[in-house]
Image (cartoon, helix red, strand yellow):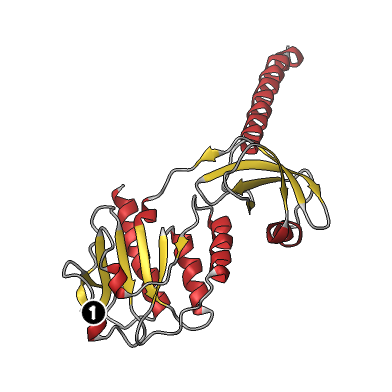
Amino acid sequence: MGGTGTIPALLVNANHLYAVVVSMLEAFAAARTTAGVNLRTLLLPAPLSRGTAIVEGDEAHHGRVVLRLRAGEDIRVADGEGHAAPAVVTGVGRTALEIEVAEPETLPASTAELLTVAFAVPKGDRFADLVRGLTELGVGRLLPLRCERGERVPGNLDRVGRIAAESLKQCQRPRLPVIGPVVGLEDLAAEPGVLVICDPYGAPAAPGTATATTLLIGPEGGFTAEELALLPTRTKRVRLAASILRIETAALAAASVWVAAWEGAA
């Protein structure tokens, strides 16, 4: 009796094990056909489309040398304009990668893309750090400011554009931020939506509902009275902290406050 009684139990256990294995295989298949956040990302030219793609140049170098991709590996591809897709590496050459791209999906826009940060350019590598951080936060536009007390604005923004692209792959945001053009305060007077200047003597920050908003971050010496006179009367003054913040600290703190408030209200 004891021996035969174990047969139903064995069948139940086998059926359970079979169900678990099937479930795992289904999950694995779904992962291969979803632009999952756990996959390493390559940036391809827009518009992203299904089929075989050849990756060359800096992106191929990034895939081969930095990510050390090999044939058969699953990756994620994106075009920086709101589209992403799963893909499989099918070939690795000396200067290029061949990948097979699945059907792209359109990624939803985030409320953070309504945010513009116009900032005085900080010194040295702090500019790159600022661009990297604002990209990770999902800010839609980054506008370097010409200021009387500010640093010289680089004539070529290509380097920080590449930094933004690297950040997009890391944080997997849907779209690249628009970087530039370089503007003055007089140009911002015509900006639509809410205009906010970060001022240690302003009122507490109150982002409100998500709407087109431009945050102004001044140079280390502050804006001059003449520059401030160029701003429209509708400009709001808000403070982020009781202390005086560096440019990149103020920019990242302000963007974080607005993004968090908007996402919390969504």
Q: Is residue 37 left or right of residue 151?
A: right
Q: Nearer the viewer, residue 92 or 52?
A: 52
- Extreme right residue here? 94
Nearer the observer, 266 or 197: 197
Q: Residue at x 58, y 65 (%)?
A: 162
The image quarter containing residue 108 is top left
Q: Position of residue 85 (x, y in %)?
A: 60, 41
Residue 178, percent from left and from top: 45, 60
- Percent position of residue 243, x then y: 30, 82
Q: Residue at x 51, y 67 (%)?
A: 132
The quadrant in which residue 206 appears is bottom left
Q: Position of residue 150 (x, y in %)?
A: 39, 84
Q: Report the number of numbered marks.
A: 1
Disc 1 marks a residue whose amino acid type is Leu
Left or right, residue 220 beside residue 69: left
Q: Say which quarter of the image contains residue 134.
A: bottom left
Question: Tag 1's secondary structure?
Answer: helix
Q: Residue furthest left?
A: 233
25 w.r.t. 190: above or below: above
Q: Residue at x 47, y 67 (%)?
A: 133
Q: Which residue is mark 1?
A: 228
Note whether 120 is above or below 116 in the view shown: below
Say left or right for 63 vs 107.
right
Q: The N terminus appears in which quarter of the rendering? A: top right
**Which residue corresponds to the image point at 68% horizontal and 19% vertical from the top-left?**
9
**How many neighbours does mark 1 have within 10 angstroms: few (below 14), some (14-19), or many (20 or more)?**
some
